[in-house]
Structures are given as structure tokens and as C-alpha cells.
Amino acid sequence: MFSLIKFKVIATLATILFLLTACSNGEETKETAIPSETALGNLLFHDKNLSFNRTQSCATCHNPQHAFIDTRDNEASPLGVSLGDDNFSIGVRNTPTISYAKFFPTFSALPAGTDADENGFIGGLFLDGREADLKGQAGGPPLNPVEMNMPDKASVIARIKENNNYIKAFEKFYGENVFDDTDKAYLKMTMAIASFEKTDEFAPFDSKWDRYLEGDYELSFTELTGKSVFFADQNSSCVNCHVMNDVNNARIKKQTFTNSKYFNIGVPKNIALIDAITAKDLHPGFLANHDMGLFENPAVDDPNLKGKFKTPTLRNVAVTGPYMHNGVFKELKTTLEFYDFRSTIDGSRRPLNPETGMPWVETPFAHTIDHGKLGMQKLSDAEIEGLECFLRLLTDKKFEHLIPDTGLDCSS
């Protein structure tokens, strides 16, 4: 199986290198037919020419070889965010994986009569749900000044038209007049990328957990401990947000481990990130108001929703650090200890951040924390280790070799 996966990866990369021949100076490209909309989306996903300085593609911040996160080593890496195409700008949020993103429902208000403890909205893309679906998400980064930094849609389409292969593919899949309307052409670009992001490459469901559910993997005692804690509704807050439905049923197959709803869990400020943004004189709104999460979505106007962010998938969580919306935690274990700390209003459990040895930094929107979702019985060190081992089970097979060696033995 590994050899087959390796062959597919090599074949895909070879195809990209062969087809992605648009030059930075706009020279004529070698014409090679692009066979499908999905293949077109694959090429666009990897094309750095769609950024202003031709240094950044979707794949730059969503590395297909590492669970679709930003793995670059640069000045932004220790801050938990991404560096822009201009090699200066940085974002305010940790770049999330787009693994299993195709399963996020379209952004919408929750139906009337929903549990009063919920926060009114579900689904969407980005951590504030501001784009309804994958194609909306795909259209954001090229025009974001701190990401790919293109000035407008017309500039992006002009880059696409530098490549004769793209021109022929667009006209073949979307009509000969597709380039007559810039907005239409840009939308078709996002549709192609979304088509690629909906493939099984992003959601193979072949982790050890999936194999366990099929009877092809046996859990160790430590993994069973973590499983018990995760799914025990009376002891753990995990299932309140990280299970789609039927929270006590651990046998549901193809679980994405998110309910796609919005909560404030009281994440600490990322002081290093704030200092760096201040020094660069970026994001004045963020510095004045903090990241308001869901409240920054144009469809949301309730100030009581400030500080609430979409619940991420736990698929591949063991290999997609740093953690939290602002990248404030480097280690998965720290994240678990933070949840144990946050489960009491007075913060009497685990009062120190293990990464700093200092008390947890304050959170900007303490008044909107969803304490009702966070309450759970105290977790022992063994249960914390069990939870980490359980979460490692959710790693796609092709990324299992990326699980960091922290000295934790999950085999016993």
C-alpha cells in the first residue's frame, strides 16, 4: 500500500512539473491538454504564479506532503502564523489544515429550537465561517494582501492567461467566452480548486482509527484509555464539540471529529505574535480589538459572539501543530492540559502553561467563554497521555511518519 501511495505522489508531482510551465516573464508555454476540471484545480493549487511576486501558491501554506499545513521555516513560523508573498507581512491566525474541509457544511444559522447552549451558526470555511463553501475559500488568499497579495481579480486572471494550457482548459470546461467576464473567470478558477480539494487525497479515511473500526487494527491499553476519556460524556468535554452526532457512539465511521459549530474556549493571547505585528505596524484593527472570530463574519452582528471560532477537525491533529486559532501552543499535550485548566472557572487545575512554566496568559473575551461546553472531571496525567495517543490514531496513513517523537509510548 505504501509503495502504491508513493507511486501516486510521484506521478502527481511529475504531472504538475510537466504541465505547470507558465514562466514568470509570460513566455509562450508548451501546450499539453489538461484532462479534467480536477486536474486543472490541482495545477492551480500548486501555481505560485498566482501570487504577486510569484513565490506563493495554495500549496505553500497547505503542504500536501504534511497534512495541508504551512511547514515553511521562516520568521513567522515560531509565531504560529504564515508569512506572506511579500516576505514581510504575517497573518493573525494559524493556517488550518484543509484536510477533510469538504465535509464542513455551508455556513448558515442554526435552526430555531436548537439547544440554547449553542451559538447560532454552523459551518462555513475559514475560522470565522466568512466563506460559505470551498470555492469561496479558494478565492480568498490570492487577493489577501498578507497572503498571495494580488491587487484584484483581473490581475489573477491575467496570470492565468499567461499559460496557454490554462486558457484551453478554461475554454473547454467553462465555455469559449469564459474570459469575457473577469468575475466569471475568477469564480471558475475557485470552482476548479474546490474540485481538487474535494478529492480523496484530502480525506482518505485510512487512519489507524478507521482501520480499528474495520477490525484491522487493535488498540493498545493507552489508546483505549484515551478513547474512553474522549467518548465519556460524563467525564470529558471532547465530544461536546468534536463529534458530529450521537456523542456516545464511538463506532460511527467516517467521523470528521467536529460539529462545525462556534465556541469560545478562552484561548490565551499570543503575546509573541502581538509584539511582532506591532513591530511591523500591521493589522491595526487586530491590535485595537483582538481577533473577534465569528463576529468578524459579515453575516454576524451579535457582539456576544466575539471570540468564538469554528471547531476544527481533529483528523491529523497530531501532525498539524501549532495549535489554536492564533498558534499559541506548540505541543498537542499543552493543548490538552489547557483544556483541563479551562474546565474549571477558577482555573484551579494545571495553573501553569507547561511550555512557559508561567500562568496561562489572559484571554481577550473572557465574558463569552462557553463554560458549559468545557466542564469535565479532572484528568490525570495518564488520561492526558491516553488522549494524546487516541488523537494520534486520527492521523492519515500517509502522514503517520510525521507524528513527532515526544517520548510518549502509545503501544503499551
Image: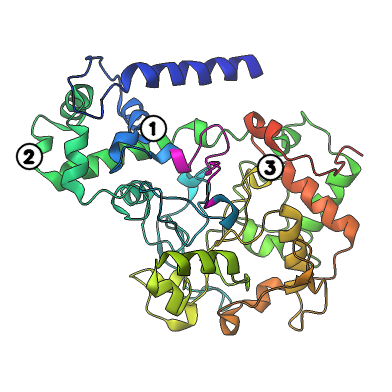
Location of residue 193 (image quadrant): top left
What segment is highlighted magenta in the picture? 60-76
The type of residue carrying mark 2 is Asp
C-beta proximity under 8 Å, tags 3 and 2: no
Q: Is residue 219 left or right of residue 126?
A: right
Residue 212 vertical placement versus 257 (above, below): above
- The residue type indicated by label 1 comes to His
Relative vertical location of residue 260 with respect to residue 69 in this rendering, above or below: below
In front of the other: 264 or 213 = 264
To which residue does mark 1 refer? 46
- Is residue 270 visible in this depiction of the protein? no
Q: Is residue 58 placed above or below 128 in the rendered structure?
A: above
Q: Amino acid at mark 3?
A: Leu
How busy is the neighbourhood of tag 3: few (under 14 within 10 Å), some, or many (20 plus)? many
Q: Can residue 402 be spotted in the picture?
A: yes
- The correct choice, above or below, for 8 with respect to 184 in the image is above
Q: Which mark is residue 104?
A: none
Residue 313 percent location from the top left of the image:
58, 51
174 with respect to 48 (left or right): left
The residue depicted at 32 percent of the width and 19 percent of the height is 19
Percent across and percent down for residue 200 are 50, 31
If the image is split into quadrants, where does the C terminus sit?
Answer: top right
Could you tell which of marks 3 and 2 lies nearer the N-terminus?
2
Q: Earlier in the sequence, mark 1 or mark 3?
A: 1
Q: Which residue is mark 2?
A: 180
Q: Which of labels 1 and 2 is toward the front?
A: 1
Q: Nearer the viewer, residue 77 or 400?
A: 77
Q: Which residue is mark 3?
A: 394
